[in-house]
């Protein structure tokens, strides 16, 4: 079994590596023979978008069908890596300019010039830079789509998927940093004011109810502890009487005394306990 699992993993890895370089088949009519590669991560989620009627040439197709054709036309992982190049260059240029300004214009130490998300001005510069890149990208895609008689697929084929995802991530991170406490407080108020709509009198009654529950929990815990101690003492007494009753070190008279004590500890009725030889004789006769 371990060998089969290892071989299966190796086969899967080889299959993925082969697909990343492009499958042996062509995409369709007019294909250059490059072969279909692995899809960009999360692009497959568009298959859940089986709605809409988008213009693609002379046909109208759903968003899921359009994205399938977009993938077949070259929007695979290799093209995604190519799309990441301008995004990477743009961010590196912005960070380099920011470092130069911090070091030589504001005379900060090199340790203070490390570009991290702790610097608000750098975060805004990155958002502005990525927004500009996306604005140019969507303008170019829109112009090409109009030239192709409003072909939506041509418009999508010229969008930089990586740039838009990066912009969304930067904006969401900035919102979380700036408005995280405010959003958390808003959710808390929403939970208190919307999900639990109660009057001040009802709040007081609920608090009293919780207080009574807490008091009951404390009293029950005390009773349980006392009961546990009592049961433990009773079992210790019974165990002691059993040992003394059957101990060979004790005389017969002493064993008989402990036997009667054991019977009383176990709850035997006093009239049924044999206390002397006469009771034994009466029992057997």
Image (spheres, grey):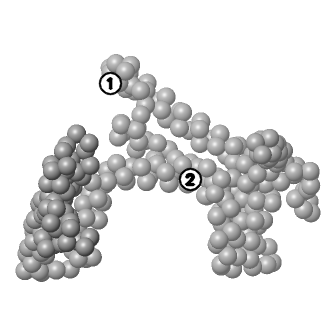
In the image, residue 73 above or below residue 270:
above
Q: Which mark is residue 165?
A: 2
Please say if the residues under marks 2 and 1 sit with CB atoms less than 8 Å apart: no
Q: Which residue is mark 1?
A: 106
Left or right? Give the position of 143 relative to 256. Answer: right
Dot 1: few (<14), some (14–19), or many (≥20) neighbours within 10 Å? few
Q: Which mark is residue 245?
A: none
Q: Position of residue 98 (x, y in %)?
A: 43, 31
Residue 265 vs residue 260, the one in the foreground: 260
In the image, residue 102 above or below residue 214:
above
Report the number of discs.
2
Residue 59 vs residue 179, the one in the foreground: 179
Q: Position of residue 158 (x, y in %)?
A: 70, 56
In the image, residue 94 above or below residue 284:
above
Is residue 216 visible in the rendered structure shown here? yes
Residue at 41% over, 34% down: 116
Quadrant where the C terminus sits is bottom left
Q: Earlier in the sequence, mark 2 or mark 1?
A: 1
Is residue 258 visible in the rendered structure shown here? no
Label 2's element?
A: helix
Left or right? Give the position of 248 relative to 152. Answer: left
Residue 93 vs residue 283, the one in the foreground: 283
Foreground mark, 2 or 1? 2
Left or right? Give the position of 263 relative to 39. Answer: left
Residue at 69% over, 48% down: 80
Label 1's element?
A: loop
Residue at 69% over, 43% down: 81
Locate residue 109: give its quadrant: top left
Residue at 65% over, 79% down: 52
CA gap between label 2 and label 1 equals 33 Å
């Amino acid at each position: 079994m371990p060998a089969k699992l290892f071989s299966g993993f190796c086969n899967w890895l080889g299959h993925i590596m082969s697909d990343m370089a492009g499958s042996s088949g062509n995409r369709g009519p007019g294909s250059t023979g490059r072969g279909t590669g692995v899809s960009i991560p999360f692009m497959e989620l568009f298959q859940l978008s089986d709605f809409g009627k988008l213009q693609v040439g002379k046909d109208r197709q759903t968003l899921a069908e359009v994205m399938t054709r977009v993938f077949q036309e070259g929007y695979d992982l290799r093209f995604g890596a190519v799309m990441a190049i301008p995004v990477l260059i743009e961010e590196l240029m912005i960070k380099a300019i920011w470092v130069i300004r911090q070091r030589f214009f504001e005379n900060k130490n090199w340790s203070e010039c490390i570009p991290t998300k702790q610097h608000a001005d750098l975060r805004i510069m990155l958002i502005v830079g990525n927004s500009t890149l996306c604005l140019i990208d969507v303008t170019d895609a829109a112009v090409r789509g109009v030239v192709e008689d409003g072909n939506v697929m041509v418009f999508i084929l010229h969008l930089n998927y990586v740039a838009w995802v990066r912009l969304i991530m930067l904006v969401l991170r900035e919102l979380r940093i700036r408005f995280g406490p405010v959003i958390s407080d808003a959710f808390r108020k929403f939970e208190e004011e919307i999900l639990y709509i109660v009057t001040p009198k009802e709040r007081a009654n609920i608090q009293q109810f919780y207080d009574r529950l807490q008091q009951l929990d404390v009293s029950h815990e005390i009773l349980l502890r006392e009961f546990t101690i009592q049961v433990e003492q009773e079992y210790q007494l019974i165990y002691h009487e059993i040992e003394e009753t059957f101990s060979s070190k004790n005389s017969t008279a002493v064993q008989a005394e402990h036997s009667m004590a054991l019977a009383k500890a176990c709850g035997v009725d006093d009239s049924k306990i044999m206390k002397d030889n006469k009771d034994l004789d009466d029992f057997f006769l």
